[in-house]
Image: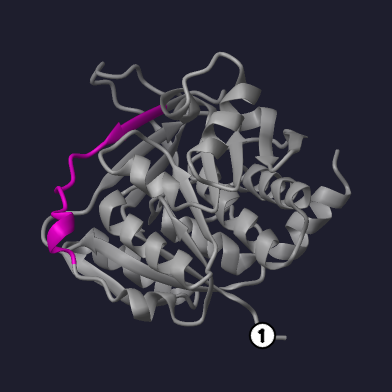
């Protein structure tokens, strides 16, 4: 059986996740006593494509890392697990870095380094090579203008486009219009479709262009709409260590389900289960579950 290719395009950062006995207050200057540290590619398309790969697909990543040691580390990490990274380029400047401190009580402190801005108009990308043989294209919103070009090209070729929107940015609205499936957090929905009623907001999001919309609700699960079908999936209870990257795992697992020809509701279930399982690891990388584990978790929901 030939595994389908999931292609992803975006800016690839680095995540440093630390497990501390106690998370200090932001800006306090206190040092946290650390029990463990994880260094991995940051949340976004790299984690999404890796999750799709772990759930049965092949993965191809295109985009940009920083031209520093952290960028080289991120690219090497993707290479080690067998992802195609021939289209990952080093962009001028340093890597975008996220530092997350978590403690056993679930408290989190997220600190983001400045990183260097990317000049999207100067970023070369071979879209034909990226999309060659691809069965789906996954996008985040790290460089929306370039990603919108890729989405338009994919749509012309009949390749489904699944977009995960995480923050308001210039060009995001155009990117959303090219999405076949839009995935977003409940917080971001309030930016895209400011409604008090989540169900009404789902309708507003579909009206923007996507044929299906999924809103992730953290530990409460997810809700989605495809045509006239509304799906509500309760959260999967797990002993959570860290939620970093869970949304990106959801993204990749949903695509794996879609390419496995699962019905829409089952895609949301699989993605929710995989995202929950990923929270049992530290950082966005180590907790990504394998296909059999995610399917068994869905089947044997606690």
Q: Tell me which corner region of the image, top left, top right, bottom left or bottom right, holds residue 64.
A: bottom left
Query: The N terminus is located in which quarter?
Result: bottom right
Q: How is the image coloured?
A: one colour
Q: Position of residue 281 (x, y in %)?
A: 58, 47
- Residue at image coords 83%, 56%: 296
Disc 1 element: loop
Badge 1 is on which residue? 2
Q: Vertical placement of 252 versus 243: above or below?
A: below
Q: Position of residue 113 (x, y in %)?
A: 22, 39
Give the class, few, some or many, for how many residues have Cα within 10 Å of label 1's Cα (few <14, many ≥20).
few
Q: Please give left or right for residue 1 compared with residue 288 in the image.
A: right
- Residue at image coords 40%, 33%: 101
Q: Position of residue 48 (x, y in %)?
A: 51, 57
The residue furthest top is 196
Q: Is residue 111 magenta?
A: yes
Report the front residue among 41 and 55. Answer: 55
Q: Vertical placement of 208 versus 47: above or below?
A: above
Find the magenta span and give its range.
Answer: 109-123
Q: Vertical placement of 277 versus 125: above or below?
A: above
- Residue at image coords 41%, 36%: 34
Report the front residue among 225 and 207. Answer: 207
Q: Position of residue 71 (x, y in %)?
A: 25, 62
- Residue at image coords 44%, 53%: 178
**Total label count?**
1
Residue 243 in view: no
Q: Tell me which corner region of the image, top left, top right, bottom left or bottom right, holds residue 220.
A: top right
Q: Please give left or right for residue 161 compared with residue 265 in the image.
A: left
């Amino acid at each position: 059986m030939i595994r389908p290719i999931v292609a992803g395009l975006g800016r690839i950062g680095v995540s440093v996740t630390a497990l501390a006995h106690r998370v200090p207050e932001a800006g306090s200057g206190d040092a946290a006593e650390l029990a463990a540290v994880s260094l991995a590619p940051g949340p976004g398309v790299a984690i999404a494509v890796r999750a799709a790969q772990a759930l049965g697909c092949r993965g191809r990543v295109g985009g940009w890392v920083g031209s520093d040691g952290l960028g080289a580390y991120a690219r090497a990490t993707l290479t080690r697990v067998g992802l195609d990274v021939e289209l990952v380029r080093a962009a001028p400047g340093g890597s975008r870095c996220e530092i997350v401190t978590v403690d056993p009580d679930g408290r989190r402190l997220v600190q983001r380094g400045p990183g260097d801005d990317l000049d999207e108009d100067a970023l070369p990308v071979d879209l034909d090579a990226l999309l060659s043989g691809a069965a789906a294209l996954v996008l985040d919103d790290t460089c929306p203008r370039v990603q919108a070009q890729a989405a338009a090209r994919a749509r012309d070729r009949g390749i489904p486009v699944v977009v995960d929107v995480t923050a308001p940015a210039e060009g995001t609205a155009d990117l959303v219009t090219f999405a076949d499936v839009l995935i977003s957090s409940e917080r971001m929905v309030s930016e895209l479709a400011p409604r008090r009623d989540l169900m009404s907001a789902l309708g507003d999001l579909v009206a923007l262009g996507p044929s299906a919309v999924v809103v992730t609700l953290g530990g409460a699960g997810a809700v989605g709409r495809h045509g006239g079908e509304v799906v509500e999936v309760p959260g999967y209870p797990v002993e959570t260590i860290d939620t970093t990257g869970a949304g990106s795992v959801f993204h990749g697992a949903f695509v794996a389900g879609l390419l496995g020809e699962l019905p829409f509701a089952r895609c949301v279930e699989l993605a929710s289960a995989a995202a929950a399982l990923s929270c049992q690891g530290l950082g966005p990388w180590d907790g990504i579950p394998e296909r059999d584990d995610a399917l068994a978790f869905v089947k044997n929901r606690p």
